[in-house]
Image (cartoon, rainbow, N blue to C red):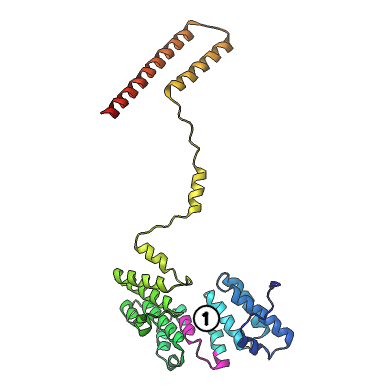
Amino acid sequence: MPIPEDVTGEEIDKDVRQELMSLPKGLAEDVSKNLVMVARLIDEDPEAAYAYSKIALRLASRVAAVREAAGFAAYANQKYSEALAEFRAARRMTGSVDLWPVMADCERGLGRPEKALEMAGAAEVHKLDKAGQVEMRLVAAGARRDMDQLDAAIVTLQSPELASNSVQPWTARLRYAYADALLAAGREDEAREWFAKAVESDKDGSTDASDRLAEMDGVEFVDAFVEDEDDDDEVEPQDDVSVVDELDDEDEDDDIEDEDDGEDDGEDDDEVEAAAETKEDVVKEDVLFKEEDEDDDKN
């Protein structure tokens, strides 16, 4: 796949660059560029990111960073079995437990929530940093919900991190998950409170908490572009035409027809006289309505 000219490969993390130093210089550069494309596209175009990850994997399958990137690209495309295999390979190479939560989430994706819960109780969790432990808690709560254990999911999310007033990178997602679990359990008032708290801490828009909150409050958003299209489709209103004007137009049409025929028969004269009488009656009615309106205004 083509690599944009602005991608040099130097954009990757320094630790990854250090890993790639074991490769020949030209090969390392090609791998790094593909890894940059994976990171750049994984959110907006997961399929393209996956394609770049496969190229990097073909070039350097023995590099842990490459296996990890391939795992995340597969995970983003819901290829959970493939993702789990890549994460396990990366973990074997590095001995790190950092990927433990996402590996457990792959088990959920494969329909094995019990396995995810087993991993949530493993010794590896204690080796995770605070962010990793919060992520593991989110996965465990998700597994509980997979098993229709809503109350257990709510309890799983109740933690010092949830109660803390300080805002951390994981705060918005933790509060959002808690609000969503409360709502699923029918505890709407509490859910609304926690969706509001999630909005407060979601500075980068990582969740749709604001939309969920608006939905609970009955706020409906209308797309302005749709309104404009509807307006374009509407027929332009015509100028108001009074009944008298319509009768005038009919008279003119009759006169034109008479001129074209070159004849003035008695039937046409009768029609003209009838139209004139109708016109006169309408004018009288129009005047009468106006007088009544004026009287009403005075009263």
Magenta-drawn stretch contains 100: yes
Q: Residue furthest front?
A: 298
Quarter of the image for the C terminus: give it: top left
Magenta-drawn stretch contains 88: no
Q: SS class of the residue under badge 1? A: helix
Instruction: Count residues near mark 1 (Cα–Cα under 10 Å), then give few for <14, some for 14-19, many for 20+.
Output: some
- In percent of the image, x 49 and y 20: which residue is there? 249
Relative vertical location of residue 241 with respect to residue 187 in this rendering, above or below? above
- In percent of the image, x 57 and y 72: which residue is there? 46
- In percent of the image, x 37 and y 62: which residue is there? 215
Residue placed most toward the observer, 259 or 224 = 224
Residue 186: in sight, yes or no? no
Part of the protein shown in magenta: 91-106
Residue placed most toward the observer, 286 or 105 = 286
Q: Quick check: 296 left or right of 81? A: left
Q: Position of residue 231 (x, y in %)?
A: 49, 45
Q: Position of residue 262 (x, y in %)?
A: 58, 8
The secondary structure that dominates the magenta segment is helix
Q: Position of residue 161 (x, y in %)?
A: 38, 83
Q: Amino acid at mark 1?
A: Ser
Q: Residue furthest left?
A: 299
Q: Which residue is mark 1?
A: 81
